[in-house]
Structure formats: C-alpha cells, structure tokens
Amino acid sequence: MVRVQLVVLITSLLVTGFIIEQVRRRRLAVEYSLIWIVAGLGMIFFSLWRNGVEYLADLMGIYYAPSAIFVIFGVLVFVLCIHFSLAISKLSSSNRVLVQRIALIEDDLKNLEENSASLESE
C-alpha cells in the first residue's frame, strides 16, 4: 500500500469514526450524519481501490484523475448545501408556527386573567 493510500485510509477512518461517535453521543442527528458517513465510506473505498479514482475519472471523461476528486467534492458540497437549505427552511417554518401558537396562548391567558379579575371585582 502506497503511503498516500495509507494516509487517506487513516484519515477516512478517523473522520467516519468521529461522525459515528458524535451520533452515538447524540450531538449530531442521524439524518444529518448520513451524508457524512457515506462520504467517509466512499473515501475508505477509494483509498483501498488504488485505480478507483482513475477509473472514475475515465467514466466522467476527465483527463487528469485528481480533478475528478474536486468534481466529486464539489457535488458533495452542492448536495450538502441543498440538504441544509431544506432543513433550515423546515425549521424556519416550524418556528413561525410555534411563535403564532405562543401568541394565541398568551392572548388566551391575558383574556382569562382579565375575565377572572373582572369577576373578582364584582
């Protein structure tokens, strides 16, 4: 095994192990960790398959194989951006609904307090 392969394999294992540990400690939600685990497993796969990057570059029609790595990471970043944009949109919508519900509950509470105060004064 070439030194570069060994370094990439160790790094991939460390990153994947870190993500799994964060999920285990409940610091990272499973739905957000899946893309990172898949990326880590992909890095492990390509670090073990020596000619994998060259084969993948050939499939994509890229002449210089290391450029394929940048294309893959670019696609990964794009997918992450879309995923997190969807998650932020969902959370924003949920926050809006919660704020509206809290406002309605506070209004109901204020009305109840006013009604109880008016009944006590009579």
Image: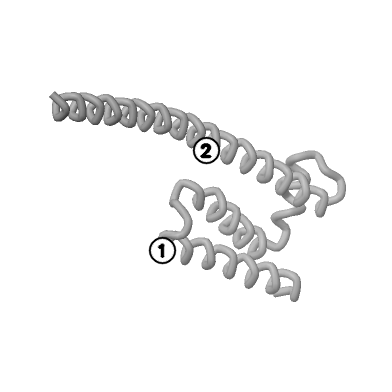
Please tell me which residue lies in front, 26 or 76: 26
Residue type at tag 1: Arg
Residue type at tag 2: Ala
Q: Is residue 23 above or below residue 74?
A: below
Where residue 104 sits, quadrant-wise, is: top left
Quadrant including the C terminus? top left
Question: What mark, if any, has residue 87 been given in the picture?
Answer: 2
SS assignment at label 2: helix
Question: What mark, if any, has residue 24 been given in the picture?
Answer: 1
Label 1 – label 2 distance at C-alpha: 21 Å
| Residue 68 place in picture, x, y as percent | 77, 48
| Residue 47 place in picture, x, y as percent | 66, 64
Quadrant including the N terminus? bottom right
Q: Residue furthest front?
A: 122
Q: Is residue 48 above or below residue 60?
A: below
Q: Nearer the viewer, mark 1 or mark 2?
A: 2
Image side of residue 43 versus residue 115, left or right: right
Give the total number of marks visible in the rendering.
Answer: 2
Please tell me which residue lies in front, 65 or 35: 35
